Image: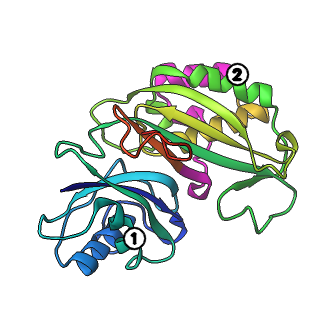
Amino acid sequence: MNIALKVSYDGTCFSGWQIQENGRTVQGELERAICERFGFFSRVTGSGRTDAGVHAAGQVCNFVLSDGIKISAERVADALNTALPPDVRVLESVAVPEEFDACRSAKKKTYRYSLYFARRENPLSERYAVRFGEKPDLSKMRECADLLEGEHDFSAFSATGSSVKTTVRTVSSIKFVPYGTEYNWEQNGMHVDVCGNGFLYNMVRIMAGAMLDCGTGKLTADTVKRALCTGERDLLGKTMPAKGLTLLRVEYATDVFGASEGRMQI
């Protein structure tokens, strides 16, 4: 039986999603939990890799459960959670068609980059957001975001040395969302939600940095245009820290986890 999982994790103490020889990973913890609870090894396929320190609210993955295991698909989440550490949890588990592959079947992903604006660090924000000392100009950030939406060659927005078949990606939307209901978001913080068909290594973190630099006058819209046209990484600013990034949701052609209110649309 092919099982899809919706997983949430705090990436602070993980070396990323993908299993490694010398590093604690989310994939490794899930595969260990499957072995512990069900007595056999099964490879877990994720919708994509998250880097060290990156969080997830709705990572999707799948694995094959042996036919000899007598448990309903919906109870797999509970079984695995008893063997998982507290910084990773399976939120939902469902049976999916044999051909479903969490990575190859994915159509869109939405990543969220979280920022808060303050002179001093706030302990309740620091773990999942990046502090910035000055308030950016939101209109300038939107101007940059408008340039980044659509299909482009995003080679300038990728970490040096990454190897992929193509650096062309489509960003379907970039939205600015209030940072918590207790904040006046234009004064104190925001989430930047980026949705697209796929992302290069560090792409969203570099995009977030470019939008923030435009908002503070360190970068101009013309420079962003030139970076898109030339692929020159040096035209842009630094890669933003991993802790501000969260994989928010993954979308598929069919609704894997159900369409009821409160469930993720994937």
The amino acid on which the numbered mark 1 sits, given as a three-letter code, is Asp
| Residue linked to disc 2 | 143
* Frontmost residue, 245 versus 88: 88
Q: Position of residue 95 (x, y in %)?
A: 27, 52
Which corner quadrant of the image does residue 222 belong to?
A: top right
Q: Position of residue 206 (x, y in %)?
A: 56, 41
Identify the disc placed on residue 78.
1
Q: Position of residue 4 (x, y in %)?
A: 31, 53
* Frontmost residue, 50 versus 60: 60
Disc 1 or 2, which lies upstream in sequence? 1
The amino acid on which the numbered mark 2 sits, given as a three-letter code, is Glu
Chain part drawn in magenta = 220-246
Is residue 237 a member of the stretch shown in magenta?
A: yes
Q: Residue at x 76, y 33 (%)?
A: 215
Residue 61 visible in rendering: yes
**Whole-number angstrom distance, CA of label 1 to CA of label 2:** 45 Å
Residue 220 visible in rendering: no
In the displayed structure image, the side of residue 154 where residue 115 appears, left or right: right
